[in-house]
Image: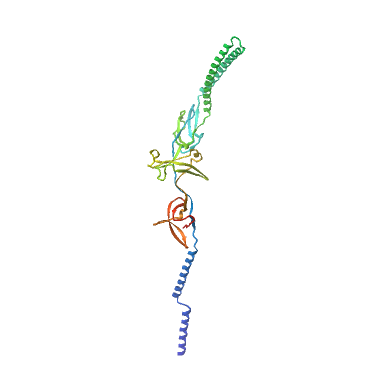
Amino acid sequence: MLKIKKRLLALIMATGIVITSVVPGTKEVRAIEAGQYDDLYIEALSQEAKKAVYKTDTVRKGTFSIYYTQVPHVDYDNYYYLWNNLPIGQVTFKNYETMVGDWIEVGDTVCNIEIKVDEERIAELESRIAKEEDMLTTYAYTCEELLAEYDRLYQSGKGDAELAKLLYDRLKHSYDEEVKRRRESIDALQAEYDGWIMAQLQTTITATARGYVEYLEQFHRGMIIDNYGFIGVIFRMEDSKFGLEGGSEYLRFGLPAVLIQKDGDNTVKVEGMVCTCLDTSLPASLVGSKSMIDFDKEMYKQLNPRKGATLKVERVHMENALMVKKKAVYEDSHGSYVLMDIDGRKTRKYVVVGGSNDDDTWIISGVNEGDAVILK
């Protein structure tokens, strides 16, 4: 019995040793696995770094510009009156067809009206014109008969021929002068008559110039508008300047400027130049309270006056400048730098920057044309 117990104990111990050697403890397994995973992670990072492909931009040469951009204020050097351009008749206001802020062209309706004409004056003019025409016809007939007789006597060559020639010349001169005077008188009466007749048909007052409506008189329905009476004010686009209130430190006299307007798919660019600015080094005549930009007046016709515009002034212009994308240049406490791939590693290369616009940065020194810089 004792031998059997000893054999069982030995068997149990042997089994325990085998199990221990085949199935290690939990702590030991985790330690081994953790070590293996760390090695694999480090190896994976190393391989990834060696195979990494960066997005890059190439240092290139080209034309580099820096623009100053702002929405300008429109200043008008000239304005134009809206008035009742009907010389005759009693004009009664009905209603406006335009309002302050509108853009109007020549011939556009400013307001609707009713007009009352002098019927008696029309009848009087009609009678006078007919009478004057009759009298002129009678006078002309009489004079032409005499002129014909004088001419006949002169052509006959008889004793009174020279006297006939003298009488012909005198009558012809006075006849021409009188016909001219009477015709001018009749034409004046006819013009007045035509004006009254046309006035009867007039239902509107129209603009005789184009521009923005700046002011309109406060008329009410039924009010009388005097002949050539004031109605309102318009500013004329052709006589305008674009400026920046208070000026700008970025603008200098003579700088080229572009006025850009986007109207749907259409983009209009009008070229001009800075004509006054806040620069005390300039002559007094060129210094103003605003920076003013003068543009080609003919080009204004291409602009839509109801749309805003952007002022773009070129402050820096460089030919053969080294450039990279603006997002390829970074800053730290030591200055500006770019990132370059050197032996598979991102390396900072410090550069001297000349300036940046919306897209590119001008590099004065630190890199060469053709270098590849990394974009983050």
Instruction: Write the residue at 45% across / 72% down.
Output: 35
Q: Position of residue 104 (x, y in %)?
A: 49, 36
Q: How many numbered discs sit on the rendered protein?
A: 0
Q: Is residue 211 depicted above or below 262 in this figure?
A: above
Q: How is the image coloured?
A: rainbow
243 and 265: which is toward the camera: 243
Q: 113 and 288: which one is in front? A: 288
Residue appearing at x 43%, y 59% in the figure: 348
Q: Residue at x 47, y 84 (%)?
A: 14
Nearer-the-camera pick, 142 or 322:
322
Residue 317: image location, x then y, percent: 46, 47
Above or below: residue 194 compared with residue 157: below
Does residue 1 appear in the picture of this structure? no
Whether residue 187 is visible here, answered yes or no, is yes
**x and y percent of residue 254 in the render?**
44, 42
| Residue closest to the far right | 156
Position in image of residue 327 (x %, y %): 46, 54
Residue furthest top as drawn: 159
Q: Is residue 317 above or below residue 95?
A: below
